Image (cartoon, rainbow, N blue to C red):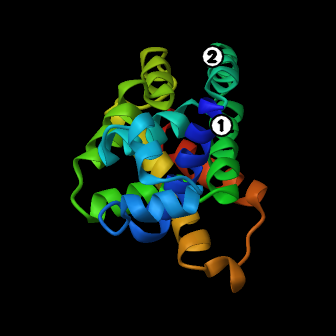
Amino acid sequence: MKHDRRQDILAAAMELFAKKGFRGTTTRDLATQAEVNEAIIFRHFKTKEELYSAILEHKACENRDARIEEIERLAAASDDQKFLETLGRTFLERHQNDTTFLRLLLFSALEGHQLSEMAVASMTARNPIASYIQKRINEGAFHQVDPQLAARGLLGMFASFVLWQEVFGFKKTQPYDAEEVVRTFVSIFLRGIANE
């Protein structure tokens, strides 16, 4: 039963933090949304910060093992197009279907909350795109560039697209096929980084 309540609290917190921000969400709001009393929240999470941290960990861990396995397999094959398209497609699928995590990150950054630093740290600690770029630089396939910066540039295209389409609502007036987006962004990236 504890696990179910914990999951209910996490789900309620994700929804509310994504709508109202960290500061705009009270524990009373969380309790109402999760259909529990405030004491139950504090039994599972000592502070709102701990709850927020659990959300970040939960979102980061979703399907992580399967993703890591596929990323490692594709990286070993050194098929740049397939590797980057797979990562781009995964990013779009994950964030277009559920903008909650993106909204949480935006709120935490805009509110100047230290928890946005946690998210950045967790995303940069193990960056498979940067590792792949460094590997391909070492093999002479890519120009000598800062792999972290290049990875951020590629992910930035996808993140910006999701932000404009899903958060700002451009998908209503300018819908795009996800496969077209993936092919276009990866093509632009590879033309700029690949040694010819």
Rate crowding at label 2 as few (under 14), some (14 to 19) or many (20 or more) other CA atoms within 10 Å.
few
**Amino acid type, callout 1:** Asp
**Which label number is shown at residue 4?**
1
Horizontal and vertical percent position of residue 143 = 41, 32
Q: Residue furthest bottom?
A: 173
Q: Quadrant of the C terminus?
A: top right
Please tell me which residue is depicted at 62% across the width and 80% down the height of the picture. 170
Q: In percent of the image, x 34 and y 69: which residue is there?
A: 24
Q: Name the residue under label 2.
A: 72
Return the disc, 1 or 2, that comes first in the chain's sequence. 1
Work out whether residue 196 or residue 119 is closer to the camera in this orientation and state it.
119
Q: Identify the residue at horizontal 47%, vertical 19% (top origin).
A: 140
Q: Nearer the viewer, residue 65 or 181?
A: 65
> Of the residues shown, which amino acid type is indicated by label 2?
Glu
- Nearest to the eye among marks 1 and 2: give it: 1
Q: How far apart are marks 1 and 2 (CA)?
A: 33 Å
The residue nearer to you, when weighing 90 against 121, is 121
Label 1 crowd (10 A; few <14 / some 14-19 / many >=20):
few
In the rendering, which numbered label is found on residue 129? none
Q: Where is residue 4 in the image (x, y as percent from the top left)?
A: 65, 37
Q: Which of 104 and 85 is in front in this view?
A: 104
Position of the N terminus by quadrant: top right
Q: Up-down: is 164 above or below 37?
A: below
